[in-house]
Amino acid sequence: MATKALITGGAGFVGHHLARLLLENGCSVLVLDNFSVGKRENIASLMEHPDFDLTVTDLTDEKATAEAVAKFQPEVVFHLAAIHFIPYCNEHPTETIKNNVVGIQHLLEAVRNTPSVRRFVFASTADIYRQQDEPNLEDETPVGSFNIYGISKIFCENLTRYYLKICPDVTFVNARFFNIYGPGETNPHVLPDILGYLAESDTLPLGNVDPKRDYIYVTDVAEALWAMSASSTPSTEVNVGTGKEYSVRELVDCIAELTGRGLTITHDPAKFRRSERMHLVADIGKIRRLTGWVPKHSLKEGLAELLQDEGIIEDHRPAARSRIPEAA
């Protein structure tokens, strides 16, 4: 088991949950973050921990990245830093490629020159898969994204495979994340959007509510990353999801049940995406076989924890009534 872990983007959504988990398991943790997306309040409670450290830097700064890695001498590197809100990525393709692709190349080069590193875990995405209605299999489903974010991640995965050839002592794991939700989310995805509306009204102006996604709770993702670093997993690709899919309509249904509020969905044309796949769900058999990891949270359990963290409900017991009329 690694005792020194470096997390890029460690003040971000997944990163700060992972940092806390690693510290709880006896690791020394260095976070690299430029705070373009991550928040200092996410790691404020960790700053006094004797085994936690922070370096404020940008991975596009090759020299600073190399110096930080060389100084810390990590055994495992978790690369989570990226621009990953798809609408923003599509509107800013040059910035996305610079941060996501150039950033990982600088980090991989630093790893190549740091003999202590034995494992590199990269936060990839399910968005690299081509559209299909069936669960996605790492070694079978064709790859081919139709947006800049997914394209950047495909390139990044290819870079890890290149560095595997020139760094044979390092194990590279590409962890393909499905739709993550939970406390501390840093991008305006659908659940933060819904929670924002809940604070003001029972009316939810949303986009397309019919496509189904595989929603996984953020602490389950952190535990999957920990499992991949602590196991003898060979260099590979793994899905990080639940194997179950739900529509936004079903998310609202579950939230209505947990809160006991009659929620009304209205349709906001500005929120509809120009291209939208109807299904995106993981097959998680591979990660289960390799590490023994399985997600702990059902959708209802995860939403209940999130709603409690937001102060919207007081406990996890389902409320008495559930009514979800939908306005045209």
Image (spheres, helix red, strand yellow):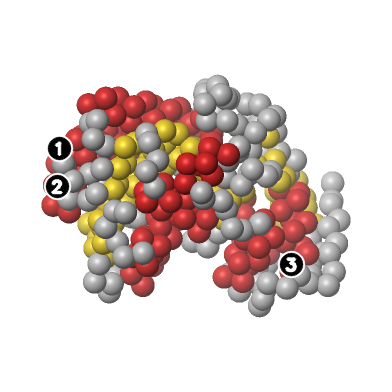
Q: Secondary structure at mark 3?
A: helix
Residue 321: percent from the left, percent from the top? Answer: 85, 69
Structural crowding at the residue carrying mark 3, measured as other residues with C-alpha within 10 Å and reported as few (<14), some (14–19) or many (≥20): many
Quarter of the image containing the N terminus? Answer: bottom left
Decide which of 33, 170 is in the foreground and name it.
170
Q: Secondary structure at mark 1?
A: loop
Residue that carries the numbered disc 3 in the rendered image? 258
Instruction: Give the residue displayed 26% in from the left and 62% down from the top.
Output: 28
Is residue 175 found left or right of 170 in the rendered image? right
Mark 3 or 1 closer to N-term? 1
Three-letter residue code for mark 2: Ala
Three-letter residue code for mark 3: Leu
Decide which of 194, 26 is in the foreground and name it.
26
Is residue 262 found left or right of 151 in the rendered image? right
The answer to which image quadrant residue 131 occupies is top right
Residue that carries the numbered disc 2 in the rendered image? 70
Mark 2 or 3 closer to N-term? 2
Is residue 54 found left or right of 81 in the rendered image? left
